[in-house]
Image (cartoon, helix red, strand yellow):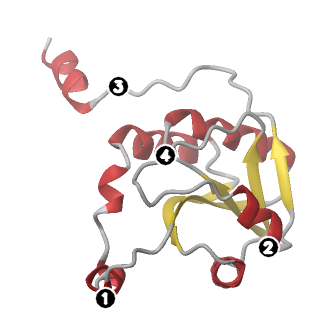
Amino acid sequence: MKTLNIIIPSDFTLSSLNIIPVLAERYPDQKLNISFVHFLQLSDSISDLLLLSRRSREYQLISDEFYAGCTMLKNDYADQIENIIPDFFYGNTVAVFKNYLEEKEAGLIAMPESHNYARLTPNSFDPTILMQRSGYKIITLKAKVKQPLTIVNAEAEHELLEV
Protein backbone atom coordinates (compact mmCIF):
# COMPACT_ATOMS: atom_id res chain seq x y z
CA MET A 1 0.00 0.00 0.00
CA LYS A 2 1.46 3.30 -1.12
CA THR A 3 1.64 6.26 1.25
CA LEU A 4 0.06 9.52 0.11
CA ASN A 5 1.47 12.71 1.64
CA ILE A 6 -1.19 15.40 1.92
CA ILE A 7 -0.68 19.09 2.74
CA ILE A 8 -3.65 20.94 4.27
CA PRO A 9 -3.49 24.70 4.91
CA SER A 10 -4.64 25.30 8.45
CA ASP A 11 -5.10 27.75 11.28
CA PHE A 12 -5.01 24.83 13.75
CA THR A 13 -8.65 25.06 14.83
CA LEU A 14 -10.64 21.93 15.65
CA SER A 15 -12.93 22.56 12.68
CA SER A 16 -9.96 22.15 10.32
CA LEU A 17 -9.72 18.51 11.43
CA ASN A 18 -13.13 17.75 9.88
CA ILE A 19 -11.46 17.16 6.53
CA ILE A 20 -9.66 14.02 7.75
CA PRO A 21 -12.69 11.66 7.66
CA VAL A 22 -13.44 12.88 4.12
CA LEU A 23 -9.84 12.18 3.04
CA ALA A 24 -9.92 8.73 4.64
CA GLU A 25 -13.15 7.98 2.80
CA ARG A 26 -11.83 9.30 -0.52
CA TYR A 27 -8.54 7.33 -0.36
CA PRO A 28 -9.54 4.07 1.36
CA ASP A 29 -6.75 1.95 -0.11
CA GLN A 30 -3.87 4.25 0.75
CA LYS A 31 -1.87 5.07 3.84
CA LEU A 32 -1.97 8.79 4.59
CA ASN A 33 0.59 11.21 6.02
CA ILE A 34 -1.23 14.46 6.73
CA SER A 35 0.50 17.78 7.40
CA PHE A 36 -1.57 20.73 8.61
CA VAL A 37 0.45 23.75 7.50
CA HIS A 38 0.19 27.39 8.52
CA PHE A 39 1.79 29.91 6.14
CA LEU A 40 4.02 32.72 7.41
CA GLN A 41 5.90 35.40 5.49
CA LEU A 42 9.55 35.73 6.35
CA SER A 43 10.44 38.59 8.62
CA ASP A 44 12.70 41.42 7.47
CA SER A 45 14.61 41.25 10.75
CA ILE A 46 18.10 39.73 10.44
CA SER A 47 17.97 38.35 13.97
CA ASP A 48 14.65 36.62 13.20
CA LEU A 49 16.16 35.09 10.07
CA LEU A 50 19.24 33.90 11.95
CA LEU A 51 17.09 32.19 14.58
CA LEU A 52 14.59 30.75 12.11
CA SER A 53 15.92 27.19 12.40
CA ARG A 54 15.43 27.28 16.18
CA ARG A 55 11.84 28.48 16.07
CA SER A 56 9.40 27.05 18.52
CA ARG A 57 7.47 30.21 19.30
CA GLU A 58 4.88 29.49 16.60
CA TYR A 59 4.21 25.99 17.94
CA GLN A 60 2.91 27.62 21.12
CA LEU A 61 0.04 28.97 19.01
CA ILE A 62 -1.26 25.43 18.49
CA SER A 63 -3.77 24.49 21.17
CA ASP A 64 -3.65 21.31 23.21
CA GLU A 65 -7.16 20.59 21.92
CA PHE A 66 -5.84 20.53 18.34
CA TYR A 67 -3.11 18.04 19.30
CA ALA A 68 -5.68 15.93 21.16
CA GLY A 69 -7.99 16.01 18.13
CA CYS A 70 -5.13 14.86 15.90
CA THR A 71 -4.41 11.98 18.27
CA MET A 72 -8.07 10.98 18.40
CA LEU A 73 -8.40 10.96 14.62
CA LYS A 74 -5.14 9.07 14.19
CA ASN A 75 -6.47 6.43 16.58
CA ASP A 76 -9.87 6.33 14.83
CA TYR A 77 -8.21 5.73 11.46
CA ALA A 78 -5.17 3.82 12.75
CA ASP A 79 -5.18 1.37 9.85
CA GLN A 80 -5.03 4.20 7.31
CA ILE A 81 -3.34 7.27 8.84
CA GLU A 82 0.35 7.00 9.58
CA ASN A 83 0.92 10.58 10.75
CA ILE A 84 -0.90 13.83 11.43
CA ILE A 85 1.47 16.69 12.11
CA PRO A 86 1.20 20.46 12.42
CA ASP A 87 3.84 22.43 10.53
CA PHE A 88 4.75 25.94 9.45
CA PHE A 89 5.84 27.14 6.03
CA TYR A 90 8.09 30.22 6.02
CA GLY A 91 8.18 32.14 2.74
CA ASN A 92 5.95 33.64 0.10
CA THR A 93 7.38 32.62 -3.26
CA VAL A 94 6.31 29.79 -5.52
CA ALA A 95 9.89 28.49 -5.82
CA VAL A 96 10.31 28.17 -2.06
CA PHE A 97 6.87 26.57 -1.75
CA LYS A 98 7.70 24.03 -4.48
CA ASN A 99 10.89 23.15 -2.60
CA TYR A 100 8.84 22.67 0.56
CA LEU A 101 6.38 20.39 -1.27
CA GLU A 102 9.23 18.35 -2.78
CA GLU A 103 10.90 18.00 0.62
CA LYS A 104 7.59 16.77 2.10
CA GLU A 105 7.08 14.53 -0.96
CA ALA A 106 3.56 15.93 -1.20
CA GLY A 107 1.16 14.05 -3.44
CA LEU A 108 -1.58 16.63 -3.22
CA ILE A 109 -2.90 19.68 -1.42
CA ALA A 110 -6.34 19.37 0.18
CA MET A 111 -8.50 22.43 0.81
CA PRO A 112 -11.74 22.48 2.79
CA GLU A 113 -14.58 23.89 0.67
CA SER A 114 -15.69 26.51 3.21
CA HIS A 115 -12.19 27.65 4.01
CA ASN A 116 -11.80 30.62 6.36
CA TYR A 117 -8.10 30.99 6.95
CA ALA A 118 -7.52 32.82 10.24
CA ARG A 119 -4.25 34.65 10.82
CA LEU A 120 -2.34 33.39 13.87
CA THR A 121 0.34 36.08 13.68
CA PRO A 122 0.83 39.39 11.85
CA ASN A 123 3.07 37.47 9.39
CA SER A 124 0.37 34.89 8.52
CA PHE A 125 -1.10 34.97 5.04
CA ASP A 126 -3.72 33.18 2.96
CA PRO A 127 -1.85 30.63 0.81
CA THR A 128 -4.52 30.14 -1.87
CA ILE A 129 -2.74 31.98 -4.70
CA LEU A 130 0.64 30.46 -3.78
CA MET A 131 -0.84 26.96 -3.90
CA GLN A 132 -2.58 27.56 -7.22
CA ARG A 133 0.63 28.80 -8.83
CA SER A 134 2.64 25.84 -7.54
CA GLY A 135 1.25 23.50 -10.18
CA TYR A 136 0.56 20.75 -7.62
CA LYS A 137 -2.69 18.82 -7.56
CA ILE A 138 -5.23 20.65 -5.37
CA ILE A 139 -8.50 19.08 -4.33
CA THR A 140 -11.32 20.93 -2.63
CA LEU A 141 -13.39 18.80 -0.29
CA LYS A 142 -16.55 19.49 1.61
CA ALA A 143 -15.77 18.64 5.22
CA LYS A 144 -18.69 16.89 6.82
CA VAL A 145 -19.15 16.44 10.52
CA LYS A 146 -20.68 13.11 11.44
CA GLN A 147 -20.23 13.76 15.13
CA PRO A 148 -18.91 17.04 16.51
CA LEU A 149 -15.34 16.71 17.71
CA THR A 150 -15.22 17.61 21.38
CA ILE A 151 -12.17 17.45 23.54
CA VAL A 152 -12.29 17.16 27.31
CA ASN A 153 -9.44 19.19 28.73
CA ALA A 154 -7.04 17.56 31.18
CA GLU A 155 -8.32 19.50 34.22
CA ALA A 156 -11.94 18.50 33.67
CA GLU A 157 -10.92 14.90 33.08
CA HIS A 158 -8.94 14.91 36.32
CA GLU A 159 -11.94 16.32 38.22
CA LEU A 160 -14.19 13.62 36.75
CA LEU A 161 -11.80 10.91 37.88
CA GLU A 162 -11.69 12.26 41.44
CA VAL A 163 -15.48 12.04 41.93
Question: Is disc 2 surrounded by few (<14), some (14 to 19) or many (20+) residues within 10 Å?
Answer: some
Q: Which residue in the protein does label 3 denote? A: 152
Q: Residue 135's x, y, as percent?
A: 86, 73
Q: From the viewer's perspective, is residue 144 above or below residue 91?
A: above
User: Image quarter for residue 163?
Assistant: top left
Q: Residue 134's x, y, as percent?
A: 79, 73
Q: From the viewer's perspective, is residue 132 above or below residue 48?
A: above
Q: Which residue in the protein does label 4 denote? A: 12
- Mark 3: secondary structure: loop
Q: Which mark is residue 134?
A: 2
**Cα distance between the residues tagged 4 and 2:** 23 Å
Looking at marks 1 and 3 on the same chain, the residue that comes earlier in the sequence is marked by 1
- Asked if residue 16 shows in the view, the reply is yes
- Say whether residue 139 is left or right of residue 13: right
- Camera-nearest residue between 33 and 162: 33
Residue that appears at 65% across and 77% down: 93
- Under mark 3, the amino acid is Val
Looking at marks 4 and 1 on the same chain, the residue that comes earlier in the sequence is marked by 4
- Say whether residue 57 is left or right of residue 10: left
Q: From the viewer's perspective, is residue 70 above or below residue 134?
A: above
Q: Nearer the viewer, mark 1 or mark 3?
A: 1
Looking at marks 4 and 3 on the same chain, the residue that comes earlier in the sequence is marked by 4
Q: Nearer the viewer, mark 2 or mark 3?
A: 2
**Cα distance between the residues tagged 1 and 3:** 39 Å
Q: Residue 107's x, y, as percent?
A: 79, 70
Residue farthest along the left direction in this orientation? 162
Give yes or no for contact between labels 4 and 1 (Cβ–Cβ under 8 Å).
no
- Asked if residue 28 shows in the view, the reply is no
Q: Which residue in the protein does label 1 denote? A: 50
**Cα distance between the residues tagged 4 and 1:** 26 Å
- Mark 1: secondary structure: helix
